[in-house]
């Protein structure tokens, strides 16, 4: 089992910045994929960004150049720095960890979600 605790959501004006953090504990494999997803009202959950344990990152086109994902393997944390926020970034953001064995996802864990609201 893996437990994920998120922090850092809130209300911000358009053009502002927020930083989300997620601390993972429990059975985390040496090869894992940590990431952030979001779900806006009436929409499906979508990938925002992820980062594998080796450091390679992947971003949704809608956030490229504005968001930066990073991780600290020694602390099992993943962060999402969000800059130049837009109203369409408003959503509940979820931390996600996938344990990987032999290039396959063996287990998949989710945080409780944190609300990000971009509004003037």
Image (cartoon, rainbow, N blue to C red):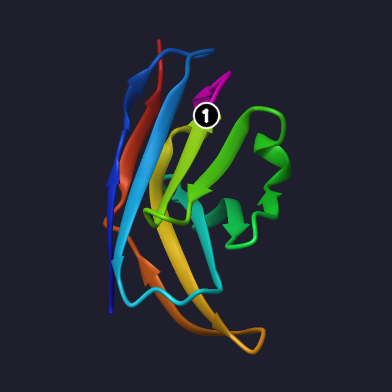
* Residue 26 magenta-highlighted: no
Secondary structure mostly taken by the magenta-highlighted segment of the chain: loop
In this rendering, the answer to whether 33 lies above or below 31 is above
Extent of the magenta region: 82-87
Displayed quadrant of residue 83: top right
Q: Quadrant of the N terminus?
A: bottom left
Between 66 and 38, the one nearer to me in the picture? 66
From the top left corner, tell me how far across and down residue 102 is, in percent: 64, 89
Q: Which residue sits furthest front?
A: 74
From the top left corner, tell me how far across and down residue 8 is, in percent: 31, 33
In this rendering, the answer to whether 81 lies above or below 21 is above
What residue did someone put label 1 on? 82
- Left or right relative to 6: residue 98: right
From the top left corner, tell me how far across and down residue 38 is, in percent: 47, 49
From the top left corner, tell me how far across and down residue 114 is, in percent: 30, 43
**Residue 43 can be seen in this image:** no
What residue appears at the point 33 percent right and 77 percent down from the top-left corner? Answer: 27
Q: Quadrant of the C terminus?
A: top left
What residue appears at the point 39 percent right and 53 percent down from the top-left corner? Answer: 94
Total label count?
1
What residue appears at the point 50 percent right and 60 percent down from the top-left corner? Answer: 34
Q: Secondary structure at mark 1?
A: strand
In this rendering, the answer to whether 93 lies above or below 12 is below
What residue appears at the point 44 percent right and 66 percent down from the top-left corner? Answer: 97
**Residue 46 can be seen in this image:** yes
Q: For label 1, count other residues whose C-alpha is less than 10 Å away and answer few (under 14), some (14-19) or many (20+).
A: many
- Left or right relative to 93: residue 46: right
């Amino acid at each position: 089992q893996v437990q994920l605790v998120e922090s850092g959501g809130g209300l911000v004006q358009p053009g502002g910045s927020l930083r989300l953090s997620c601390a993972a504990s429990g059975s985390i494999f040496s090869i894992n994929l940590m990431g952030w997803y979001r779900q806006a009202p009436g929409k499906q959950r979508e990938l925002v960004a992820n980062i594998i344990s080796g450091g390679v990152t992947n971003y949704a086109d809608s956030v490229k150049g504005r968001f930066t994902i990073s991780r600290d393997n020694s602390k099992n944390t993943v962060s999402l720095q969000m800059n130049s926020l837009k109203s369409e970034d408003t959503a509940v953001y979820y931390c996600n960890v996938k344990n990987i064995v032999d290039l396959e996802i063996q287990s998949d864990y989710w945080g409780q979600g944190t609300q990000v609201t971009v509004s003037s």
